Image (tube, rainbow, N blue to C red):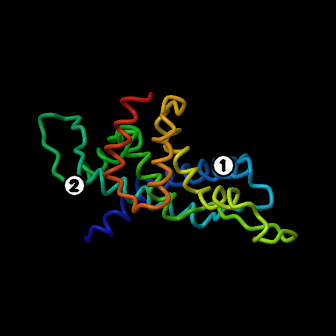
């Protein structure tokens, strides 16, 4: 069995419900965020449900691959050794109730990675407004809406107090989210640092 076939099998067996729950949660959060964002009058927001569906599945593909490569399941029977990639090993690693959990920094980094890739919030200019007449500051705000959401959601997932984070650090994060290639390994380290210093 190839790695992609194994991942697909694990997703179907252990993560279908979690994918659906993450999608429902994200749809609700994304809609609320887009609707509540000040300074976007003149724009109509919509949500790309297919992108949300794909980003949730992609997130869990990353979770499965990370667990398979970096984690080992707890063995409930210490007298017998779990054979890696056996059915018992796989069940122990991926089971929703007793399986291994990822650190919050990894959950946040993987989630942000896929939000930034799929950019599920779409904005259109209202019909009665000329795009050239929109204030440049408002256009920049609209252009970075997905990045703003990804950052806010990152901090929410990690229960970080954003009032403790210096504005320069927040500006750097938005810049990274907007213009840099997102490398989740870099953000694992950065978000672990945030968790230690800004909780």
- Residue 115 point in image, percent of width and height: 52, 57
Q: Which residue is mark 2?
A: 86
Q: Which residue is mark 1?
A: 28
Horizontally, residue 29 falls left or right of residue 124, namely left
- Residue at image point 66% right, 49% down: 28
The N terminus is located in which quarter? Answer: bottom left
- Residue at image point 31% right, 52% down: 185
- Residue 154 point in image, percent of width and height: 49, 44
Camera-side residue: 196 or 21? 196
Determine the image quadrant of residue 87. bottom left
Question: SS class of the residue under badge 1?
Answer: helix
Nearer the N terminus, badge 2 or badge 1? 1
- How far is the residue under mark 2 from the one under mark 1? 37 Å
Camera-side residue: 63 or 135? 135
Question: SS class of the residue under badge 2?
Answer: loop
Q: Check disc 1: other Cα within 10 Å, few if <14, some if 14-19, many if 20+.
A: few
Horizontally, residue 45 falls left or right of residue 67, namely right
Q: Compared to 143, does 149 lie above or below?
A: above
Determine the image quadrant of residue 193. top left
- Residue at image point 36% right, 48% down: 187
Camera-side residue: 199 or 174? 174
Number of the label disc, if any, that sits on residue 109: none
Horizontally, residue 194 falls left or right of residue 42, namely left
């Amino acid at each position: 069995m190839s790695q992609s076939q194994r991942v697909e099998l694990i997703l179907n067996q252990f993560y279908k419900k979690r994918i659906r729950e993450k999608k429902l949660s994200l749809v609700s959060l994304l809609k609320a965020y887009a609707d509540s964002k000040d300074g976007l009058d003149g724009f109509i927001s919509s949500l790309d449900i297919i992108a949300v569906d794909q980003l949730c599945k992609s997130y869990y593909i990353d979770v499965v691959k990370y667990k398979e490569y970096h984690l080992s399941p707890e063995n409930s029977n210490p007298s017998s050794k779990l054979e890696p990639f056996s059915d018992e090993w796989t069940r122990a690693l991926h089971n929703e109730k007793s399986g291994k959990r990822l650190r919050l920094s990894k959950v946040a980094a993987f989630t942000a990675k896929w939000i930034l890739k799929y950019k599920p919030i779409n904005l259109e200019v209202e019909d009665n407004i000329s795009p050239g007449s929109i204030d440049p500051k408002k256009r920049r705000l609209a252009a970075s809406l997905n990045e703003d959401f990804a950052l806010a959601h990152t901090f929410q997932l990690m229960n970080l107090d954003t009032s403790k984070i210096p504005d320069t650090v927040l500006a750097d994060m938005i810049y990274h989210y907007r213009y840099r290639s997102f490398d989740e390994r870099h953000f694992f380290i950065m978000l672990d640092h945030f968790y230690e210093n800004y909780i």
